[in-house]
């Protein structure tokens, strides 16, 4: 009884929060800063540098949204959240949006009453092996010893993968990622498995990263994307279409280098013109300036540039585009049209 | 006739110097025989220990002295270091972040540093009886000064806070004389509230009057945050704990049961749960947009937690006093407040010192738990931003060693002080 009363009170308070902050974008403009929830630190995705300035792939999304709404990519108040505090921070209105490599799942979308606004990184469980093992595919791992974190979905995914391929393995259960790194480097296991982006980040810390390879097989779906709480669809549209603008910009060849030239006057490509506000009134429909997308793209570049600068092959993390390539290049990154 | 000279061949005119004891009973050899090699099992243990210490130092010293301090990433470290050596560059590059967090304004680092130095000045008269009593005035002013230094903003805000306490105290003294304790107590609270309310308008209207650059609580971090939480919570929980311990022994039934329920409830809940309540659950109940400072919430929770423990420690001290002490106080005609202040508490607190210090040391280390609710204290800084930067992911020993060192220095200092205090107060049995 008491519990239901408590939950009821929380629900009412949560609803009140949703109603009171119905015009999130007005709050942000009045405040002069976007409150954006990020991780307390994840290599390549979000971390402050030595000067205390936040950098990373998820941070880039926050900055693009701030640039679209306020015209200033630095007008972001980053609120670090842990896996445990992220959803309450969003539900209670402490943050306006969450860009914290959060997997889009049914229960989070429906039961926790959030709106996922797209996918900015398709992650999935992968495998890392020493190069000297001479393995090029996970299906060749018959009889291998696998380092795996206990109590995670990766454990279940691993069992499924090996069973469906009819091959055997010896699990070596470990507690934390740091322990896994040590065990793997000491040769206690042949294979280390966790999310592919985590594997790449781990590999980047090795003394000789080139001696290890991440195998091409991905055995689970972890679509990561920004989200907002239910109750303000107009705000959700702004975040969704800012992300789409970054993706479309890459598809259309609009980058931070040529955007000044392209946005100066209407060109020959009508979709570029609509995106950059030199034609049509898409910005007005969102309740933003006509050059909202120009600001968003100038903040950190288009989707491809963000990827390359923070986690791409030129960085220490060295992730390949893979699933995160544009749909034209065989990936899953796809934006609805701007019209 | 034999000459006298031949009769006495040799007469010693001075004493023989006492010969030194044999080397088997004195000097380093004897000491070693006595303390290190007194029997065969001891000798084996000694040799094993020496071997253990040698391997430890053989690993540690090259790592410590072969380390590099001026590279810009772990990969550069690996290129530079030959053989073994620590990558201490992370400490020199992120030094400010480890001490002050990521977003404290860099040109204002002198402010928390000054507040830290003044902390010793303020604490000295409370901790050492030899220090002149006049310094106690500074101790009273220190909390407001430190708040102004660390958080910035106009000096009016802490001054209004101070004036409120002064007004409350004056009203209490006046009313207590004429109308008794209860009237004084509530009168004091009302007077303080009135001053705070009026002063709030004034300081709100003049935000730039002798103002330092304001720093939001969210931007506090690093070891500074641990020090703030530790100092504030220990100093607040001590009086609260005494009040709770006395309340628990009170004859007034309601007060007694409030104290019992509070203590038992808080002690029955893990600190981390209270922190989650402070961070997460309160956010649901407060109306959206209210900015009830997160550090303040955390301070309240940690203070409540340690006050409950200190109350139980002090209750142990009270219980250890012989009943005769209470009766002696009564027979002298002292009232409750006098007997507590003059007879009971001085003895009970002396007995409780080791326990209180134990709680204080534990509390100081527990402040690192705030990293779980995504505050960037020293541990949060290391776990989050520093280990997640592409430059420093993979540097563990250097960072955690540094954190341990900082905490060890503070905790060992507290422990040494408490032992000194115990010796100072030892008046019995020895």
Image (tube, rainbow, N blue to C red):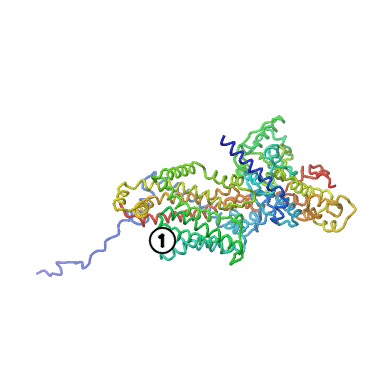
Tell me the residue at 81%/49% (across/down): A285
Q: Viewer-proximal residue, B154 or B266? A: B154
Choose between B346 and A204: the one closer to the eye: B346
Q: Nearer the viewer, residue A232 or A184?
A: A232
The single residue placed furthest to the left in the displayed view is B1
Secondary structure beneath dot 1 equals loop
Q: Residue at x 41, y 50 (%)?
A: B354
Q: Quadrant of residue B219?
A: bottom right
Residue sitting at the far right:
A268
Horizontal side, residue B270 vs residue B42: left or right: right
Residue that mark 1 sits on: B128
Q: Is residue B116 shown to the viewer in this render?
A: yes
Q: How many marks?
A: 1
Task: Please say if A84 is above or below A54.
Answer: above
x and y percent of residue A170 in the render?
A: 63, 33
Query: In the figure, residue B10 lies in which quadrant?
Result: bottom left
**Position of B419 compared to A314: left or right?**
left
Residue B187 spot, x, y in % from top left: 47, 56
Badge 1: chain ID: B
B8 versus A41 height, above or below: below
Residue A2 location, x and y as percent? Answer: 56, 36
């Amino acid at each position: 009884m008491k519990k239901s009363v408590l939950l009821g009170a929380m629900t009412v308070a949560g609803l009140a929060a949703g109603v009171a902050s119905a015009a999130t974008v007005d709050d942000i403009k009045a405040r002069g800063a976007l409150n954006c929830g990020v991780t307390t630190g994840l290599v390549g995705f979000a971390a402050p540098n030595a000067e205390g300035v936040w950098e990373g792939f998820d941070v880039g999304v926050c900055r693009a949204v701030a640039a679209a709404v306020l015209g200033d990519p630095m007008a972001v108040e980053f609120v670090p959240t842990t896996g445990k505090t992220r959803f309450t921070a969003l539900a209670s209105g402490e943050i306006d949006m969450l860009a914290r490599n959060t997997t889009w799942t049914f229960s989070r979308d429906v039961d926790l009453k959030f709106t996922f606004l797209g996918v900015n990184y398709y992650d999935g469980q992968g495998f890392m092996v020493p190069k000297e093992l001479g393995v090029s595919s996970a299906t060749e791992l018959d009889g291998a010893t696998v380092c795996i974190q206990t109590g995670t979905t990766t454990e279940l995914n691993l069992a499924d993968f090996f069973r469906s391929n009819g091959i055997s393995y010896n699990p070596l259960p470990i507690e934390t990622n740091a322990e896994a790194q040590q065990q793997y480097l000491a040769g206690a296991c042949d294979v280390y498995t966790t999310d592919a982006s985590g594997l790449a980040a781990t590999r980047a810390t090795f003394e000789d990263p080139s001696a290890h390879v991440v195998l091409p097989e991905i055995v689970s779906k972890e679509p990561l994307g920004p989200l907002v709480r239910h109750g303000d669809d107009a705000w959700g549209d702004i975040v969704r279409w800012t992300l789409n603008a970054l993706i479309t910009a890459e598809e259309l060849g609009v980058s931070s280098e040529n955007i000044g030239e392209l946005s100066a006057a209407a060109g020959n490509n009508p979709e570029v013109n609509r995106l950059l506000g030199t034609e049509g009134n898409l910005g007005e429909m969102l309740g933003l300036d006509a050059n909202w997308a120009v600001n968003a793209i100038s903040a950190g570049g288009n989707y491809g540039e963000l990827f390359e600068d923070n986690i791409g092959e030129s960085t220490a993390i060295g992730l390949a585009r893979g699933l995160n390539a544009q749909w034209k290049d065989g990936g899953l990154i796809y934006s609805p049209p701007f019209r | 006739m034999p000459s006298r000279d031949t009769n006495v061949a040799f007469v010693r005119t001075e004493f023989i110097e006492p010969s030194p004891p044999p080397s088997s009973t004195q000097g380093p050899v004897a000491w070693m025989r006595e303390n290190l090699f007194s029997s065969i099992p001891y000798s084996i243990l000694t040799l094993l220990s020496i071997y253990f210490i040698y391997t430890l130092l053989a690993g540690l010293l090259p790592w410590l002295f072969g380390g590099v301090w001026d590279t810009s990433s772990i990969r550069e470290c690996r290129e530079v270091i030959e053989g073994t050596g620590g990558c201490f560059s992370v400490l020199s590059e992120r030094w400010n972040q480890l001490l002050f967090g990521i977003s404290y304004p860099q040109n204002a680092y002198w402010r928390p540093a000054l507040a830290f130095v003044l902390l010793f000045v303020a604490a000295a008269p409370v901790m050492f009886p030899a220090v002149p009593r006049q310094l106690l005035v500074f101790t009273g002013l220190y909390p407001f000064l430190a708040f102004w230094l660390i958080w910035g903003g106009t000096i009016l805000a802490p001054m209004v806070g101070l004036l409120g306490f002064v007004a409350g105290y004056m009203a209490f003294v006046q009313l207590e004389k004429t109308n008794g304790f209860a009237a004084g107590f509530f009168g004091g609270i009302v007077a303080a509230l009135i001053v705070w309310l009026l002063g709030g308008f004034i300081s709100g209207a003049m935000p730039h009057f002798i103002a330092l650059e304001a720093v939001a609580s969210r931007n506090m971090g690093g070891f500074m945050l641990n020090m703030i939480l530790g100092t504030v919570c220990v100093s607040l929980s001590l009086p609260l704990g005494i009040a709770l311990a006395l309340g628990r022994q009170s004859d007034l039934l309601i007060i007694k049961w409030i104290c019992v329920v509070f203590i038992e409830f808080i002690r029955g809940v893990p600190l981390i749960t209270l922190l989650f309540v402070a961070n997460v659950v309160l956010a649901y109940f407060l109306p959206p947009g209210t900015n009830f400072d997160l550090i303040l919430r955390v301070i309240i929770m940690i203070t409540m937690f340690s006050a409950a423990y200190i109350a139980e420690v002090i209750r142990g001290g009270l219980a250890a006093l012989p009943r005769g002490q209470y009766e002696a106080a009564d027979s002298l005609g002292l009232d409750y407040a006098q007997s507590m202040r003059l007879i009971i508490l001085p003895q009970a607190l002396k007995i409780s010192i080791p326990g209180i210090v134990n709680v204080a040391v534990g509390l100081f280390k527990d402040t690192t738990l705030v990293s779980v609710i995504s505050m960037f204290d020293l541990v949060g800084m290391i776990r989050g931003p520093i280990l997640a930067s592409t430059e420093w992911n993979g540097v563990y020993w250097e960072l955690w060693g540094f954190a341990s060192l900082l905490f060890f220095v503070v905790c060992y200092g507290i422990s040494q002080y408490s032992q000194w205090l115990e010796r100072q107060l030892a008046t019995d049995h020895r």
